[in-house]
Amino acid sequence: MQNENTARLLKQGAIWGFIVLELIFFSVAGKFLSLSDGAFMDLDNMLLLLKQSAPIGIIALGMTIVMINGNIDLSVGAIFALSAVILLDSMTWPIFEGLGDWVIPVSWLLALATGTALGALNGLIVWKTGVDAFIVTLGSMLGYRGLVFMYNGEQPTSNLNWTLVDFAEAQPLGLHTATWFLLGCTAVLWWLLNRTVHGRNAYAIGDNREAAVNASIRVGPHMMINFMIIGFLAALSAAVFYSESGSVNPNDGSLYELWAITAVVLGGTKLTGGRGSVISTFGGVIAIQLLRKGLGYIGADTETVNLVIGLILIAVLYLDKQLNRKGKEELRI
Amino acid sequence: MAALTWSNITQVLAKQGILIAFALFMFGFALANARFLDIDNVLGVVRSSAILGVMALGVTFVVISGNLDLSVGSMMSFSTIVVLDLHDKIGPALAIPAMFALTLCLGALIGFLVGYLRLNSLIVTLGMLSAIHGLTLTWSGGKNMDIADKQGTWFGIFGQDEMLGVPVPILVFVLLAVVLSVLLARTPFGRKVYAVGGNGTAATFSGIPRARIVFCTYLISAFCVACAGLLQASRSLGSQNTVGQGLELEVLAAVILGGASLLGGSGTVFKTVIGVLILGFIQNGLLLVGLEFYVQYVVTWVIIILAVWLDVAAKRGRLWSPIA
């Protein structure tokens, strides 16, 4: 029992310990290796880091709830791109011409609705056909990406609205808009997972689906709601990001699903479902962004970042396996 | 009496569904465009599917043993870049075996992590996807890789030449498919791959060395990736660092379309070949009837889900899932 508690504490604290280690390492190493004069732990630098983690971070939060539920979503990158296209393109639609700047909330709503609908479609297929979520979302990853290309060919979709850019670049109370969205989503999802019936059922279904069915939990609707949540969050992430940049390429967001899954796994969420927390995922997102920024800061090439993140992911998996090994569960052969 | 019930129909559909769908497809496109079944067109489609197909053959083994391999795309970029780089440094005759050795080392590493350490294959190969991509960029320094003397090398024979009127990539694809099909269907090793994927615990208790079998499936996958990299490099004699990016999911789509279950234990090399050809002919057929290139993604999506749905439905004997 004592051992188990220690292991759990170790696991929950691990990601934060890792972040502290990264901070110390890059601060010290930066003194000798960095070309720039600014310190790594500079306030502006850290604020920027939070802002830059927002796009992947918001998606990773959704991925957490889907993975706790025992599913996975590979289509988030494509949903991200399609929502962005809808956001930017809808602002130029003739029917909204008379709205002036009121077109912004309308476009946002349209983009969010698109994401939610695409997520709902994934969820409905998983629920009604009983096909594994991995396959369903692998398919829709291709399909949704195809829709993005059919919308505007290989041309980028661009539309800069300066009111919107000002909103996205604002720093209310010191933090960037994107950071506020990331923090807000983390808080809401934490509440959803820990304080609502839906959250409790999501854990229960991921942990043991049969038992959940026997406890007369309706598995299907819960799964579908979770897919809608991740669709919504992918769209929100796109809305926040493209409000500022104003131009989306049809290939944008590809590989986001892999980054999001990496962050979730670094945060210690169990792949088979039933365990995990959005706070740890938040830690995972920050850890990855620190690594990318830090390696750049000490002059490492971008290629090293891929290498290091891949190796860390495997190392985390190995450590997790060691920590989780309990004589009765593991068949050692 | 074998009544024509829903469950009987679905049984037949599930067993031969992929072939029936393939036949319907070819028939439909042939009606829509006379050029579709032209021998040149068919050879062209098979030739352009060969690289994807070669990779899919290896991944079939991994999937049947109950694991996933998401690293094949980035591994293919790696082997392409490596063989092109070494071609100018040590000559093609040495570069090819060196590239195979390096790629097999990567496969062995994944096989060790998944087989012997029993780590989750999805995450391991996801990590390797990123790590190998980093390795490739480090090797090439981020630049495109080109052979200096494109005219004076015999290296192009694998990707560009024809033998007996058939393009070499097709020959490589067919040869590998036959050899691997025999290995999977006719040897004790193949039976063990099915056993490990069907029920790992039972296989272990029957004295099958689970770890070693899984290890070998990743070696086979890496070997196929090396072949694909060779074909790719030889065809273009130059390459970007990201040549294989995203291929892992298309490969997986082809394998699943062929009817291999992601849970392991089912699938054949022949069906994977059909899956690859379906993807190739869809793309070609849609282009020939005048649709945009991108429509194939949407069509592939629908087909993958329908194919797997039919398969699952036949196994449980009812169309809709029992999930409440």
Image: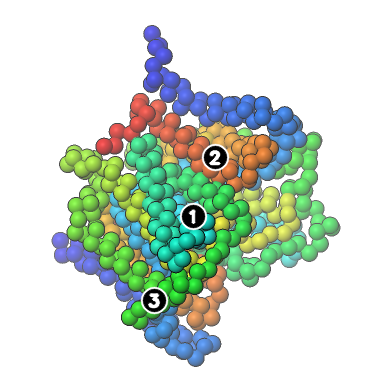
Quickly name the residue at label 1: A95
Q: Residue furthest top?
A: B1
Mark 3 neighbour density, 10 Å: few (under 14) some (14–19) many (20 or more):
many
* Vertical side of B271 occupied by A227: above or below: below
Name the residue rendered at 40%, 45% in the picture: A122
Q: Is residue A289 visible?
A: no
Secondary element under disc 2, as helix, strand or loop, is helix
Quadrant of the drawing holding the N terminus of chain A: bottom left
To the question of a shared chain for discs 1 and 3, the answer is yes
* Local secondary structure at mark 1: helix
Q: Percent position (x, y) of residue A144?
A: 49, 49
x and y, in percent, of residue B48 in the image: 68, 43
Please give the chain letter of the residue carrying mark 3: A
Compared to residue A233, the image places residue B290 above or below, namely above
Q: Give the number of the disc on residue B299.
A: 2
Residue type at the position of mark 3? His
Which corner quadrant of the image does residue A50 belong to? bottom left
A121 vs B91, left or right, is left
The quadrant holding residue A135 is top left
Query: Separation of disc 2 and disc 3 at Cα?
Result: 41 Å
Residue B116 vertical position relative to residue B187 in the rendered view, above or below: below
Reading the image, the residue beneath label 3 is A176
Label 2 is placed on what type of residue?
Val
- As drawn, the residue found furthest toward the right would be B152
Instruction: Please name the amino acid that badge 1 sits on.
Output: Ile
